[in-house]
């Protein structure tokens, strides 16, 4: 039986919340506030690189189910804290439930990878997968982006009768989640390489 | 004792190290990079470069330079060719 580790859960929850909010904040200030002076004509263009999906994938893959409460909390508090005024006016009903769909998409992808016998032995929800092999992580990114686009938009359209979701919106979610997650992993890799090069951290291989 | 939290963080670093190892873009330390730049500069300025030039220019020990050149050769970054004028001498050529 898997034993619940409370100190681990607290540490993971803080890490997940801070990491998600950092990515959401960065994405929001670059896109909505236009701090980088991108001057995007279409307000939806920024969602083509939705950085917080990177947090969802990385946190579920490496911290497993311990990360879920903090991830959901960050998913619903991110928009309400960062863009409080717009959140009350523009956000469609059911966004908070759709957030569950987005996280469920990542969980489903991880379990699909497990089921495909990436991890040896009998299937178990509590068995960790070794994501040190980044190719599995890439698979989760691809699968979760596709599923997230479908599940999240389906939930929104079921809850809201007046909102009709077109195919392009679903596609935008898929592309945004995929590019966002890949960008986060690439940025982390650049920071990691620089830290190794400047000897701020020792390579885990040494 | 390593906690679960530390293990998870180390797993993330190992994943990034694996990307780094596979892409192999900056898999060399400062000393190795300096030796590579010394070889490239020497070839650019003099038209050729041998191991003694690298030792004199870089001021690293003979063993460090030899070891690094072997590593570059194994990674197909440089080619070690026997000199036509002096059979005891080896020229270093940057791989295309």
Image (cartoon, coloured by chain):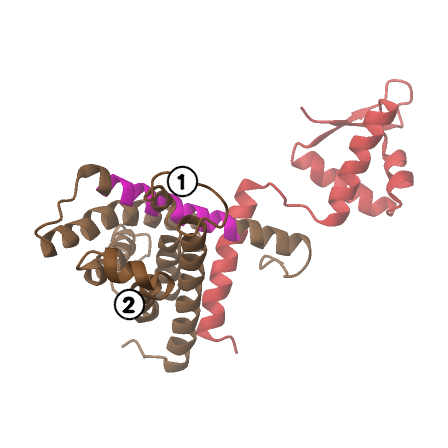
**Residue annotated with mark 1:** A40
State which quadrant residue B89 falls in: top right
> What crowding class fits label 1: few (fewer than 14 Cα within 10 Å), some (14-19), or many (20 or more)?
few
The subunit letter for the residue under badge 2 reads A
Residue at image position (52%, 78%) is B1
Circle on res. A153: none
Residue at image position (26%, 50%) is A116
Q: Position of residue B79 (x, y in %)?
A: 73, 28
**Residue annotated with mark 2:** A126
- Look at the image and say whether residue A38 sits in the magenta stretch: no
Q: Position of residue A15 (x, y in %)?
A: 44, 69
Q: Does residue A60 appear anywhere in the picture?
A: yes
Of the 4 image quadrants, the one containing the C terminus of chain B is top right
Residue at image position (29%, 47%) is A145
State which quadrant residue A110 falls in: bottom left
Q: Earlier in the sequence, mark 2 or mark 1?
A: 1
- Look at the image and say whether residue A173 sits in the magenta stretch: yes
> Magenta-highlighted stretch: main secondary structure?
helix
**Mark 2 or 1, closer to the camera:** 1
- Residue nearer the viewer, A59 or A28: A28
- Residue nearer the viewer, A20 or B36: A20
Distance between the alpha carbons at the discs numbered 2 and 1:
43 Å
- Residue nearer the viewer, A189 or B60: A189
What residue span does the magenta drawing correspond to?
A170-188
- Residue nearer the viewer, B65 or A195: A195
Q: Secondary structure at mark 2?
A: loop
The subunit letter for the residue under badge 1 reads A
Q: Which chain is brown?
A: A
Q: Is residue A7 above or below residue A79?
A: below
Both marks 2 and 1 on one chain: yes
Q: Which chain is red?
A: B
């Amino acid at each position: 039986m898997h034993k619940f580790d409370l100190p681990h859960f607290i540490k993971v929850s803080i890490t997940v919340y801070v990491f998600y909010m950092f990515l959401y904040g960065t994405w929001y200030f670059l896109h909505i506030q236009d701090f980088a002076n991108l001057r995007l004509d279409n307000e939806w263009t920024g969602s083509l690189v939705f950085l917080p999906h990177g947090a969802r994938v990385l946190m579920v893959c490496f911290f497993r189910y311990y990360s879920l409460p903090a991830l959901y909390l960050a998913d619903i508090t991110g928009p309400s804290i960062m863009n409080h005024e717009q959140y009350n006016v523009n956000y469609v009903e059911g966004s908070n439930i759709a957030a569950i769909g987005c996280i469920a998409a990542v969980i489903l992808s991880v379990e699909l990878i497990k089921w495909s016998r990436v991890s040896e032995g009998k299937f178990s929800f509590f068995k960790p997968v070794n994501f040190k092999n980044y190719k599995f992580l890439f698979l989760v990114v691809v699968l979760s982006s596709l599923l997230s686009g479908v599940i999240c938009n389906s939930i929104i359209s079921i809850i809201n009768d007046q909102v009709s979701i077109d195919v392009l919106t679903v596609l935008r979610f898929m592309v945004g989640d995929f590019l966002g997650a890949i960008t986060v992993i690439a940025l982390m890799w650049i920071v990691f390489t620089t830290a190794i090069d400047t000897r701020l951290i020792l390579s885990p291989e040494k | 004792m390593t906690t679960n939290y530390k293990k998870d963080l180390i797993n993330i670093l190992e994943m990034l190290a694996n990307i780094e190892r596979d892409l192999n873009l900056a898999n060399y330390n400062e000393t190795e990079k300096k030796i590579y730049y010394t070889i490239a500069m020497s070839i650019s300025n003099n038209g050729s470069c041998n191991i003694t030039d690298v030792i004199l220019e870089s001021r690293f020990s003979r063993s460090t330079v030899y070891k690094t050149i072997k590593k570059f050769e194994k990674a197909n970054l440089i080619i070690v060719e026997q000199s036509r004028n002096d059979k005891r001498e080896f020229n270093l050529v940057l791989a295309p």
